[in-house]
């Protein structure tokens, strides 16, 4: 997928999410303000909340769709969509018709939801992925690992019905708390460090239009990189070229 098509996809997806969420919010408001509150109204409100959660995570995933880390964004969108679909089934299927599969479906929904939220968290931090500053890059890698560890430590008790951590629950959740605190610390500190530090180079904004801009975008898409990286490579080549007489 080329850079222009990625931008078009992201713009279309954002518009679709905003419109869908607005319609769902309208239904939720009408449900609350009219009629008696029963099972149908409860399902509508739960669907509105579910769509809101999907929209928030999807917008986070879309943040990196136009970058080199786009694969993580697409995986996040897929996981969020699966969580939304399964959640909708859980809400709208007749609650009396559920049998033993209810617990399995609920566990799957919980795992998908945690995965979607964790990927959304990671994708927001991956906006710093192109920084050259060593402290930012190391901190980003450590924080991404912590995000994964926190998600895994939450998922394991769900899948094992609490058999893990079992008798070592106190130590387990203490370790989880340490990882969660470090995760939050990295999430807060990294953007600040990225904001106040430089990558060791002077940043210059260059505006290209017309054929020049289109050529840079095409070259970046064919190489799987960013337009800024293409411009930087061109400048480095010009700097290394021998001066003309």
Image (cartoon, rainbow, N blue to C red):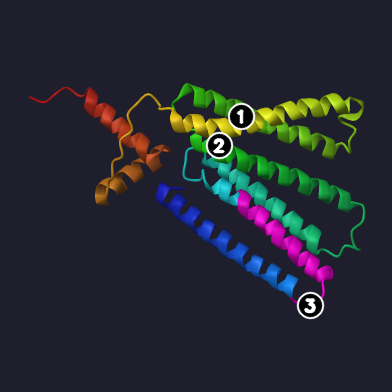
**Pointer 3 local density, CA inside 10 Å: few below 14, some 14–19, many at least 20:** few
Is residue 59 toward the left or the right of residue 234 in the image?
Answer: right
Label count reads 3
221 or 152, nearer to the observer: 152
User: Is 17 part of what is drawn in magenta?
Assistant: no
Is residue 240 toward the left or the right of residue 105 in the image?
Answer: left
Residue position marked by numbered label 1 in the rendering: 143
Query: What residue is shown at x 78% (from left), y 36% (from top)?
Result: 154
Looking at the image, tell me whether mark 2 or mark 3 is earlier in sequence order. 3
Q: What is the secondary structure assignment of the residue under circle 1?
A: helix
> What is the x, y in percent for residue 37?
82, 71
User: Which mark, by number, is residue 35?
Assistant: 3
User: Is 46 part of what is drawn in magenta?
Assistant: yes
Are dots 2 and 1 in contact, CB under 8 Å?
yes
Main SS of the magenta part reads helix
Query: What residue is shown at x 58% (from left), y 59% (from top)?
Result: 17
Give, as a single range, the part of the protein colored magenta: 34-57
> What is the x, y in percent for residue 194?
47, 31
Residue position marked by numbered label 2 in the rendering: 125
Query: What residue is shown at x 71% (from left), y 27% (from top)?
Result: 179
> What is the x, y in percent for residue 199?
40, 26
């Amino acid at each position: 997928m080329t850079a222009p098509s990625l931008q078009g996809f992201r713009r279309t997806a954002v518009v679709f999410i905003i419109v869908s969420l607005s319609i769902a919010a309208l239904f939720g408001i009408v449900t609350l303000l009219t009629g008696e509150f029963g099972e149908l109204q409860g399902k509508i409100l739960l669907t509105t909340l579910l769509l809101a959660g999907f929209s928030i995570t999807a917008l986070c995933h879309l943040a990196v769709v136009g970058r080199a880390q786009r694969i993580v964004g697409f995986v996040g969108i897929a996981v969020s969509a699966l969580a939304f679909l399964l959640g909708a089934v859980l809400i709208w299927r007749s609650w009396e018709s559920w049998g033993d599969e209810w617990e399995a479906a609920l566990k799957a929904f919980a795992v998908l939801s945690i995965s979607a939220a964790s990927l959304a968290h990671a994708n927001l931090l991956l906006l710093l992925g192109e920084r050259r500053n060593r402290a930012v890059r190391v901190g980003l890698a450590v924080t991404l690992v912590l995000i994964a560890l926190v998600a895994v430590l939450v998922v394991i008790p769900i899948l094992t019905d609490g058999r893990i951590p079992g008798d070592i629950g106190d130590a387990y959740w203490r370790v989880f708390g340490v990882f969660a605190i470090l995760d939050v610390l990295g999430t807060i500190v990294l953007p600040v460090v990225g904001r106040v530090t430089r990558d060791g180079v002077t940043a210059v904004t260059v505006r290209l239009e017309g054929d020049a801009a289109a050529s840079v975008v095409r070259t970046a898409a064919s190489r799987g990189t960013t337009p800024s990286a293409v411009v930087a490579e061109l400048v480095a080549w010009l700097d290394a070229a021998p001066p003309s007489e």
